[in-house]
Image (cartoon, rainbow, N blue to C red):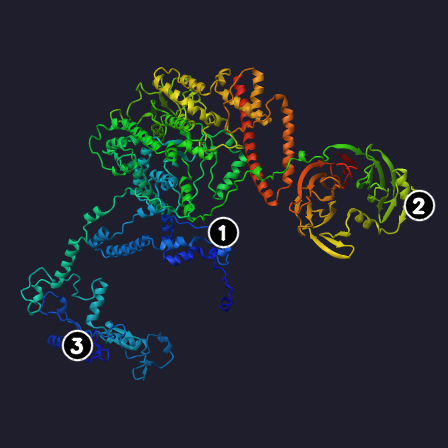
Amino acid sequence: MPKRKLLKNEEQMDNEEIEILPEIIESSDDEEDHDNDTENDLTEHGNTSFDENDENDWYYNHKRPDIIPDYNSDTSDEETENTVGNIPLEWYADFDHIGYNVSGNKILKPASKDELDKFVDSMDNPNSWKTVFNELEGKNVVLSKGDLEIMRRIQRNEYPEKDFNPFPNSVEWFSSKLQIHPLSSAPEPKSRFTPSKWEAKKIMKIVRAIRNGWIKSVEEKKEMQKPKQYAIWDDVKDEEKLDKMHIPAPKLKLPGNNESYNPPNEYLPTREEEEQILKDMEEDKLLFVPKKYDSLRRVPGFERFIEDRFDRCLDLYLCPRTIKKKINVDQESLIPKLPDPKDLQPFPYTLSIIYKGHTGKVRSLSVDPNGHWLATGGDDCSVRVWDIATGRSMKEYKFEKNVVNVSWNPSKSLSVLSISVGSQIIILNPGVETDIVNRATNEIFNLESFSESKKLPEAIWRKPTEKEFNLGFRVIIDFKKTQRYVRVYDMMQQKLVKKLMSGVKLISSMDIHPQGDNLIIGSFDKRLCWFDMDLSSKAYRTLRYHQAAIREVKFHKKYPLFGSCGDDGKLNIFHGMVYNDLMHNPLIVPLKSIFVGKTEDGLGCLCFDFHPSQPWVFSSSGDCEVKLFT
Amino acid sequence: MEAGALGTVIRYKYAGSAATNYVNRNQALKKLQLSLAAFRRLCILKGIYPREPKNKKKAGKGSTAPRTYYYKKDIQYLLHEPLVQKYRDYKTYQNKLKKAVLRKEWSVAKSLEANKKPDFRLDHIIKERYPTFIDALRDLDDALSMIFLFSTLPSLDRIVVSKIRECQRLAAEFQAYVANTKSLRKVFVSIKGIYYQAEIRGQEITWIVPHQFTQNVPQTVDFKIMATFLDLYLSLVGFVNFKLYSDENFVYPPKIDIEKDGHGAGLNAFILESTSAQYEILNRVKDHGDVANQKAETKKQSKSSVKQNQKQAMSKLPEKLKLLADQEEEVEELGDDEEELDQSIGIDAVDDDSDDKVDLSAPNLVAAFQSLNQFKNLFKGCYFWLSREVPRHSLEFVLKSFGAEVGWEDNLDDSKSSSPYNVTDSRITHHIVDRPLPPNGVKPSWVVDDRRDYIQPQWVFDCVNAQKLLKTKSYHPGDVLPAHLSPFVKYESGDYVPEDAKRLFGISAVAVSKGIDEGSMEALNDKDEEENGDKSESENEDSSESDDDDDLENEEGSDEELYEEELKAEAAGLTYSEYMQKKDSEKKEDKKDNKRKRIEVAPKGSTVTKKVKKSKKEEMENEEKKELAKMMMPKKDKRLYQQIQFGKDKKAVEVAKLEKKRDAHKKNNKKGKSPVKK
């Protein structure tokens, strides 16, 4: 069998020159041959055969070459002698060949004719008008009649094929016309006229399902459905309750007066408030601007209504819920119930005497153990001794430097005043006491005159003596304070007994309860700590009520009173009862808050002292005065 | 494990309940194998919401990234939800249907739609989320607001029209119920819409209805979410309506008079039929006194004589219901079931809860019940005429809920009009108009009859909120209306109280017990004799305010002036009794001081006027004592105290601001008025 068959019809080729293509291997000479061929080929090529007798069909009347439907049957790759392929032929312009044939031999360039030859040729050759030069082959090709006809038809915008019928009659292969002859002569199978067993089975299955009510018709289904609404809550049992952990959605806040269409005038926003609201609205906090309409007909629709609802929907399913405990405490119930101060009298509460005379701030004051004299010293470099009862300044001593501290000797039988000035401590007998006392004092000092002061180079003994007197214990314990802790030393054994943790930053002052087991600390960070030494090394109570640093804390020697004064110019008096039995904690009751004087340069009430026997308190104020409260 | 063998327990990190109780959203999705959209839908329907874990770090197993956490049990609970399977079924159904449609197999598509379409029903969810009817009522606020909103929406492509229709039906049914059982309590016209509060079974249900305008539908709103909520709310309200109707022995769904509805009859188009067995119940109640069980049995409809007897039925039904209610009351009283009685009584009982428990002795109860009944029939015997420009549906609803007869103007001719009577009817007592007056005192064209009261719609709302018939004086057309206040505000000590609040709510407690019955009776009897409309009301006021105002002028401002004086006295530190005595000495008249305000706190201190100074001193001392005691407060208490004080101060600042504004407005008004007078 030929490998390729070509389009050209041999019949129409009238000239042998036309035979361009080399491999025309088989062609049919007449119709009959062709028919036979085609019939033979049918089985091989899998082509369907059509009845040739059908006169209508142009297709089969028309002679055309056989097409062998294999991959090379396309005309696009019509084979030529030259095998260079589809390349620009100029590339071979300089060579004497124009390409290669199948076997690889060069195809020589045809001898080029000059113009004269060409002209002579065109004159001589009757076919010259239909001769075309094939560049690839380097040959002249004479177009056949058929080719010319095709060209002509194309020029006229007609179908290239002469007999092409664009509207062929349709062939009714499967038509309504009854065919007499069966397509196949096989006898009809039995299944065609016997009912199917399997179908019957299937149907029976459905029938059974319907009978048993497994399958329902649409109407039945509709009837079966529960009504859209029915008594859903009628058979409620008590046990059915919501989940314990369920947090019901909070209800929307009910509208207030400002949402009214006609609110009272005061609810309407001012211009600034309105701007703020509009700003909030931009930030997508859904709000509204309160507005007033003088009648209902003027009220417009609310633009954000749907958004409002939508936001609520989002809140309902997107917002995390949690139960927050609301503070529901009566404010007053938080204030502790304390005994009435009136029942805890006596305590100082009113101003009775003002001791005027100092020109600078009073830094220190001290009451003599008998309770008759008051010594004060301060920034005006002077120390004064006052008669408490009359308020007269009995003595005045001038120094060169500021007086830091004044203190009486705690012994009632002596009248010794110590004054610390700068880096010195001066001890003197002011000589205001009775003669007996003066004499006794002088004897101790062994001095000729009382008015002269004796300067001591170092202050060694003052503190220990005082402490010794303060504590009437067999074991002498010294308290030493650092800035944060209080260390308790046993002086006899010379060792550390306790370290009290105050929890404050800067301790300013300290005092010990006359009974010895309790002590209070005032600090610059406004706190007052009460230590019960029997309880623990931490403060029993820490009170923070001063607005500024605490300057001094002190116990009363006789009454259950203690006080504190601070830079806020306040002197607070407390009732501090210590019980003898260990089961009772000390009772602390604030009694009176006295405003001593205004603060100057951030310094208020710098020092105060209790009267040794009376419930009186002396206090210095910011404005150079000393006041007595009784 | 070795450690375990030695007796110590190994504790792994994040194995405790704080970590394992919560799952985040992604974990939940993974567990449920659902898409996010389906999960959200499920959450909406099932009412599952994220929780705020107590310890976020533990819940996040060490991560503090912002996440949404759900309760693990909630998610596990979703695993067994039948709806999840329904979703899957629906998906397969949709795929099949799509396939059939694309293949143009119409018959297959049809049969699929007929047979295989999954039926979404939310009954079981309603039952789960609201185990009892009361639970459902408690959660009705959002549902009603949503349904009323959707009933006013235009038909958009984003909303299915059938749903809007259903919303309209349910909303109308609910309104019809509220109007017929007279359970409306409060109305408030806000700039957002109209708030209504009804009381059903002791539950306060508040909903908002937008003003009658076409809604602005924003693009930002996701209607899929709204639709899911709507699905839930539709079935919830459906069931609630069914229960409400069947408990009142009405047939559900109520029939609608199509002809009337076509003419826009509103509430009148609803025909509430009682179930046929109602009369039997009445008899049985008399015999056995066991109501509750038999109520449920009676749900058969009576089909006879619907349209002819409709009007009669409408008028008689409330009476019958009341009769029935009374019967029930008796029965319950016999059973000594005070709590239920409490519930049925309504407002007062609810108010009592918030205040100290008032002892529910029999006379108190009876009085409360009577006053409630009077309030329910506030407008009874009044005939209202609504002109065209007033919001008819809202007013009709409110008026009918308080026993009024309502007629309205519509654009149809009289024969077709749905209104029960026309403008010229002589029975009309109140004509509601919202039009400007013509200039120069020309008689306006809409004045038909001089005998009736012409009022603006706000009067109706204010009357309802004040629970009494107010004077119509400043509510006439063209008048400057008094402020419309919110009835939902509860004034506590320290709150700002607007001036009108006193007029509306301040003496309402007295008014309810004394004034209204007389007032309504008068309104009933003297309807035709009313000459200027004010008279009966003003008399009514007088009687309500005991003898106080006898000497004062009978003007409107008198109350307010009195109140202001009292406020001033209070600010000056006088106790109420002292103030009264001072006044006594001034006027030398005896007065009863039974008009004590809710807001005022009147301590019983020293009573002699001369002792004022001493009491001041005492106060100072007390103050000092308090200050001293504060010193001894522990840090924790001190902080709490300061927090509370902070809140109080903030409130006080707000109040001061409002007062300042009020005074400024007053000044302005005086300035504005005085030149006019000159």
* Residue B104 percent location from the top left of the image: 22, 55
In the displayed structure, would residue B62 be above or below residue A533? Answer: below
From this viewpoint, which residue is outermost toward the left?
Answer: A180
Which three-letter amino acid code belongs to the residue tagged 3? Glu
Q: Is residue B627 left or right of residue A111?
A: right
For the residues labelled 3 and 2, the Cα–Cα distance comes to 158 Å
Q: Secondary structure at mark 1?
A: loop
Residue under pointer 2: A447
Residue under pointer 3: A44
Which three-letter amino acid code belongs to the residue tagged 1? Lys
- Judging depth in this view, the residue of A110 and A25 nearest the camera is A25
Q: Residue at x 92, y 46 (%)?
A: A446
Q: Dot 1, how many residues are within 10 Å of its Cα: few (below 14), some (14-19), or many (20+)? A: few
- Judging depth in this view, the residue of A628 and B232 nearest the camera is A628
* Residue A493 percent location from the top left of the image: 77, 57
For the residues labelled 1 and 2, the Cα–Cα distance comes to 79 Å
- The subunit letter for the residue under badge 1 reads B
The part of the image, by quadrant, that contains residue A102 is bottom left
In the displayed structure, would residue B559 be above or below residue A509? Answer: above
Q: Residue at x 90, y 43 (%)?
A: A440
Quadrant of the snapshot with the N terminus of chain A: bottom left
- Judging depth in this view, the residue of B532 and B625 nearest the camera is B625
* Residue B643 percent location from the top left of the image: 57, 41
- Residue A169 seen anywhere in this rendered image of the structure: no
Residue under pointer 1: B54
Quadrant of the snapshot with the C terminus of chain A: top right
Q: Which marked residue is nearer to the observer: mark 3 or mark 1?
A: 1
Q: Secondary structure at mark 2?
A: loop
